Image (tube, grey):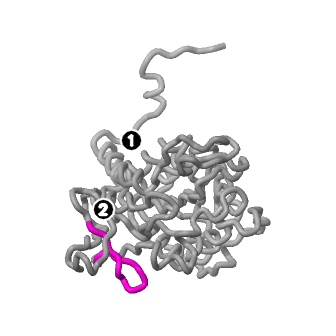
Amino acid sequence: MTDVELTTKKDWVSDQEVRWCPGCGDYGILTAIQMLLPEFGNRREDTVFISGIGCAARFPYYMNTYGIHSIHGRSPAIASGLALARRDLDVWVVGGDGDMLSIGGNHLIHALRRNINLTILLFNNRIYGLTKGQYSPTSEEGKVTKSSPMGSIDHPFNPISLALGAEASFVARTHDLDRKHMMEMMRKAHEHKGSGLVEIYQNCNVFNNGAYNEITKRDARAEMIIELRHGEPVRFGAEGEHGVVIDRGVASIVEVADVGLDALVVHNESEPDPSVAFALSRLALDMSSPTPMGVFREVERPEYGHELDGQVARARAEKGEGDLESVLRSQHTWQVD
């Protein structure tokens, strides 16, 4: 095996001018990724970023790796094909809430369901930014935009709930104002064998500015961010005075002094049944509710590529190498002059 040359953040930065709006949350995510990748000891030539369409989808241009700026919503499907055909590659998928949850929703849930070895970053700014501010699949009900002048009547997706419903083996949430936490969630998703989804609350300062201010601003975090820590009671607040209990499958916020520490749910991200993780995901009711951040679920499940390799190996052992020409001509054929 060839030794991999040590790299720094600078090695992962492309020569392309970054063209996002000044102040966009995408800058912080890009920096976090470029700082994180040297830790893995991978070659840039073996790393691929695949995106769809949207502001987030410009990501591959800014990485000094291989990349594909693909078509709207299809990045999980294209990435799935590449990850299965080239098992040696480190494949990342980048997209926004409109790209991956609207036209691309089907591709996303099947990539998660199959548990293909992909690291998927979903930038959620709750708006269509590239096409100038229409409501998206995660925009709140009543959202007034250019495409919903009387307020959106659509009920929004909760991306974490959606991923858990698809039984994704790794699901996490972070936000663009906490680089350390972003890097931790991305690192864990990348180290996970199988499909890893990280939802990132990301600010669009032009078309949906301050959407997450009540949750992610530094002076709001103690009261609004519920940090999920494996093996610990779920509690938050400056003094840990608030907590979460689950009764009959429904999570609710309580005061620890009222119910006692033993009543709180203890977070177990490796629980095979996703029901508790799903209940926790439902706490994010809107953009002004206490919101869980961290790893919701990390479980071991057969990885699709590994299982596929096993089937191919067994077929070769039993039947030998296949003959594509004979398969193509095994039924009726026509010659066109």
Depth check: 158 or 244 in front? 244
What residue do we see at 53% from left, 64% from top? 200
Classify residue 33 by image quadrant: bottom right
The amino acid pointed to by label 2 is Ala
Which badge, 2 or 1, is on the more N-terminal residue?
2
- x and y, in percent, of residue 158 in the image: 45, 53
- x and y, in percent, of residue 269 in the image: 31, 68
Highlighted range, magenta: 232-245
Depth check: 36 or 132 in front? 132
- x and y, in percent, of residue 290 in the image: 44, 68
The amino acid pointed to by label 1 is Glu
Depth check: 305 or 337 in front? 305
- x and y, in percent, of residue 173 in the image: 46, 65
* Numbered tag placed on residue 122 in the rendering: none
What residue do we see at 34% from left, 62% from top? 280
**Which residue is the site of mark 2?**
251
Q: Is residue 216 magenta?
A: no
Identify the secondary structure beneath mark 2: strand
Q: Is residue 235 magenta?
A: yes
